[in-house]
Amino acid sequence: MTVQTPTVTPSWLPAALAGLCATLIGLGIGRFSYVALLPLLIDAHWATPGAAAQIAAANLIGYMIGALTAHRFALAMGAAQAIRAAMLGICVSLILCSVNLGFAWLWGWRLLAGIGGGWLMILAAPFIMSRVPPQKRGKAVGFVFSGIGFGIILSGFSVPALGAEHLSAAWLLLAAMVALAILFAWPKFKPVPSAVAPAVAKDRLMPRGALLALLLAYMLDGVGYLPHTVLWVEYLVHGLGKPLATGGLFWAIFGAGAACGPLLTGHAADRFGFRNTVSVAFALKAFGVALPLISSSMPALVLSSFLVGAFTPGLVAVVSGRVLEIAGPAGHQRNWALLTFVYAVLQAIGGYAMASLYAATHSFTLLFALGASALTASALIATFGSSRLTVPATDDVDS
């Protein structure tokens, strides 16, 4: 398969900011805003606690569906059109969730938002990276995935301010934020004429070598960070006896880390290489998860929240860049889709397993130890393969 050269933008920043808008829409607001919305749904009597949790699960199920279908739909309709459709779908879902027509109504629209988030997670970065000069790809991918953190910050401050009394307005405010992001990003995701579109490999996925090692490391990451995203607030409030307001504070710290983490890892990747940055980021994330085992002091907890927040999307950014380095432009989208789907599956399974383990043992120590161990293994596995891989002109590479 001959790889056609994609159009590279003279300035990488506008393209990178469009990618930032895509991840802000898909995950920062489309997915993570529900963390702030969930207690408001219960307080406003829109849903029982059990129903609110099931609505949250609908988004995760949708995300897995999106991760599974994104590459195929991109081949059928074009990546730019699929990205635009996903952004619009999420905006519509937020608008329609502002009307309380019962559990099934909310569940269905949160499922759609999850599918859109999966599409944007997989398609936005390869689309943008193909239009960025190689020497700027670390910075660009950092900008793209920092949108997750900025979305967390926006929703974390805006939704609680409206409260349960104005729940419909909270949904509509989120939709308005998404609409503004779409207005900026829409022209940047312009469909590419087939004559200049980058080739996309369509052969069977058979990861091996460095790509297989990266896949295994990323799978473990999907489990390793779960103590901080499933039971972190529970640990602070009921494990350590902190006030409930402390949970909101630490979520904001997590979001601040998520906003700047990809920018830091992206800059490091340009300077030290993607492989080295991925491995060190896994190690630092493992340290962040393990910190509560060492100390429960406020500085340690703040550092733990910030590190895990920073290296959650920060690792996503540089792992995506490492996939590009290994598989080349033609293999980037499909291999990144594979890693994202496997991550989503392991995250769902691991989340259920950790929740069950906690219910059986009531041990936070065990969960942090398991998470840190998984991430330490990721750091070691990710070192496999050379730091700079040469991709042949005919891109059938899976390793």
Image: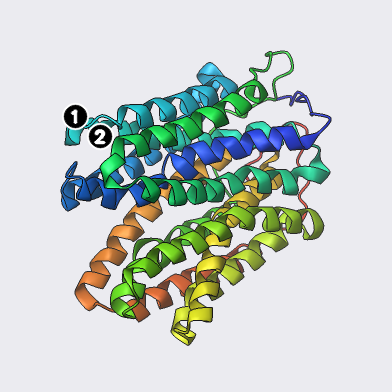
Q: Which mark is residue 101?
A: 1
Residue at image coords 71%, 53%: 266
- Quick check: 369 above or below 41? below
- Quick check: 210 above or below 198? below
* Residue 165, horizontal then vertical, whole percent: 26, 43
* Residue 33, horizontal then vertical, whole percent: 41, 46
Labels 1 and 2: the sequence-earlier one: 1
- Check disc 1 and give the amino acid type: Leu
106 sits to left or right of 371: left
88 sits to left or right of 101: right
Q: Which mark is residue 181?
A: none
Nearest the eye: 58 or 220: 58
* Residue 151, horizontal then vertical, whole percent: 51, 45
Residue at image coords 54%, 51%: 149
User: Disc 1 to disc 2, how far (Cα)?
Assistant: 7 Å
- Check disc 2 and give the amino acid type: Leu
Nearest the eye: 337 or 294: 294
Residue at image coords 15%, 48%: 48
The local crowd at label 2, few if under 14, some if 14 to 19, many if 20 or more residues have their Cα within 10 Å, is: many
Q: Is residue 315 visible?
A: yes
Task: Write down the residue under mark 2.
Answer: 106
Which quadrant is the N terminus positioned in? Answer: top right
* Residue 163, horizontal then vertical, whole percent: 32, 47
Residue at image coords 48%, 60%: 252
Asked if the residue under mark 2 is in contact with the one under mark 1, i.e. CB atoms within 8 Å, the reply is yes
Nearest the eye: 296 or 358: 296
